[in-house]
Amino acid sequence: MDIPNIQVALVCLFCNAPLQGPEETKFSSGDLIKCTQCGELNDFDSVLEVAKEKGLEQAENVIKEQLQKEFKNIFKKTP
């Protein structure tokens, strides 16, 4: 079974633009991340929570698709 790699971008909670910062920057709980598009400050914990929810949603969809492919003929009636 080929399972695709799931990637979820961290996005601004206000404008949905990808959040980007210097690569060497480390964020932790309670930090605020400034959006380069709209300038709003995003709570790091909230951004991560939204990303986790999206990741779980994507994983669920991938699993459903894989199960449908694997078992598509299992319930077919034979003449």
Image (cartoon, rainbow, N blue to C red):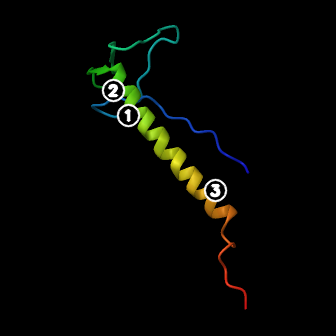
What is the three-letter code of the residue carrying label 2?
Answer: Ser
Is residue 36 visible in this depiction of the protein? no
Image position, residue 18 (x, y; %): 42, 29
Q: Which residue in the protein does label 3 denote? A: 66
Quarter of the figure with the C terminus? bottom right
Nearer-the-camera pick, 54 or 74? 74
Q: Regarding mark 2 in the picture, which secondary structure is present there?
A: helix
Count of labels shown? 3
- Label 3 environment density (alpha carbons within 10 Å; few <14, some 14–19, many ≥20): some
Q: Which residue in the protein does label 2 denote? A: 46
* Labelled pair 1, 3 in contact (Cβ < 8 Å): no
- Residue 50's disc number: 1
Disc 2 from disc 3: Cα separation: 30 Å
Quarter of the image for residue 42 reads top left
Image position, residue 30 (x, y; %): 32, 13
- Label 2 environment density (alpha carbons within 10 Å; few <14, some 14–19, many ≥20): some
What is the three-letter code of the residue carrying label 3?
Answer: Gln
Nearer-the-camera pick, 32 or 37? 32
- Going from N to C along the chain, the mark reached first, 2 or 3, is 2
Image position, residue 68 (x, y; %): 62, 63
Image position, residue 1 (x, y; %): 73, 51
Nearer-the-camera pick, 68 or 12? 68
At 64% across and 56% down in the image, what residue appears?
Answer: 66
Q: Please determine whether, in this image, residue 42 is positioned above or below residue 67.
A: above
Disc 1 from disc 2: Cα separation: 6 Å
* Labelled pair 1, 2 in contact (Cβ < 8 Å): yes
